[in-house]
Image (cartoon, rainbow, N blue to C red):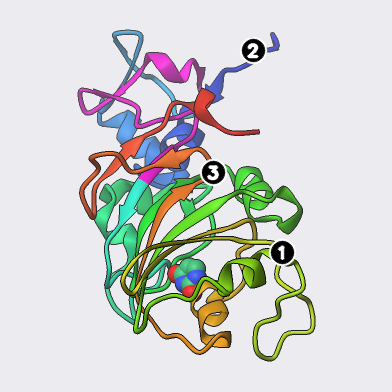
Amino acid sequence: MPIPPAGLRRIDQLLSACGYCSRREAKEWVKRGWVMVDGVVAKSAEDRVDAAKVVVEGEPLDHPDGLLVLFHKPVGTICTHEDEEGPTIYGLLPERWKDRNPPVSSVGRLDKDTSGVLVLTDDGALVQKWTAPRHHVPKVYEVGLDRDPSPDWIPLFASGTFKMLGETKPCAPAKLELVGPCAARLELTEGRFHQVKRMFGAVGAVVTTLHRSRFGPYELGDLAPGAWKLLPPEAVAT
Ligand code: URA
């Protein structure tokens, strides 16, 4: 049998990877004539094809080469795939993405009461890389507090010796700016559990609102809460 050219993928694999249907169901989709390749109705779900030439129900395939998405997480949504504890961020994305394989996941998580920048991708290696502590992706948080922030906290948070309650390992140096009454901006290179709330908690302040305004190179611009936009693959910060 001739070896198919590199880069070609089976139709059933493509449909299931992009969340249309299972590999088994793909047979039926092809049989019903719902899949076209290069303008011709596909014959077999096992055929290897160029994903860019596949049309399903009249539309090109939904991002067969992977997804990188910038999302504005609204307050009140949770960053899990299960919706037992309330509405999830995934409920605000296209329905078909829930069935993609590999799945679409957020790079790190934000608390339910936190809003702001989240990057989502189906590239597991990218998630690993951007969440690895050694990668030091800068993250900027706009923080509302129950009191005016103290200038004394600036050198404390920047010291590299500051510890949160219950932790033995000090926080990496963090940049604090005092931006107004009861308001601060904090730049972290780590992503420990509830880190912003716990850092301010350790100096006796309560975080009343929390918004992430930057993740690595990504900012929201005019993206409304709950909205998303595709990032070009070349935007991936390596
Ligand atoms: N730190 C927190 O405390 N919560 C977040 O959601 C993100 C960082």
Residue 192 lies left or right of residue 41; in this view the side is: right
Residue at image mark 2: 4
Residue 146, picture quadrant: bottom left
Classify 119 as above or below 84: above
Please state which amino acid type lies under the numbered disc 1.
Ala
Q: Examine the structure image and report whether residue 66 is included in the region drawn in magenta.
A: yes
- Taking the magenta stretch, the answer to whether it contains residue 156 is no
Q: Who is closer to the viewer here, 220 or 200?
A: 200
Rendered image: mark on residue 172: 1
Residues rendered magenta in the picture:
46-70
Q: Position of residue 133 (x, y in %)?
A: 72, 58
Residue type beneath disc 2: Pro
Label 3 crowd bin: few (<14), some (14–19), many (20+), radius 10 Å: some
Quadrant housing residue 9: top right
Q: Is residue 67 left or right of residue 209?
A: right
| Count of picture labels | 3
Identify the residue shown where x is 29% and y is 78%. Answer: 86
Q: Nearer the viewer, mark 3 or mark 1?
A: 1
The crowd level at tag 2 (other Cα within 10 Å; few <14, some 14-19, many 20+) is: few
Tag shown at residue 216: 3
Q: Callout 1: helix, strand or loop?
A: loop
Q: CA distance from mark 2 to mark 3?
A: 40 Å
Q: Quadrant of the N terminus?
A: top right
The amino acid type found where label 3 is placed reads Gly
Tell me where residue 199 appears, x and y as whole percent: 57, 78
Residue at the front extreme? 151
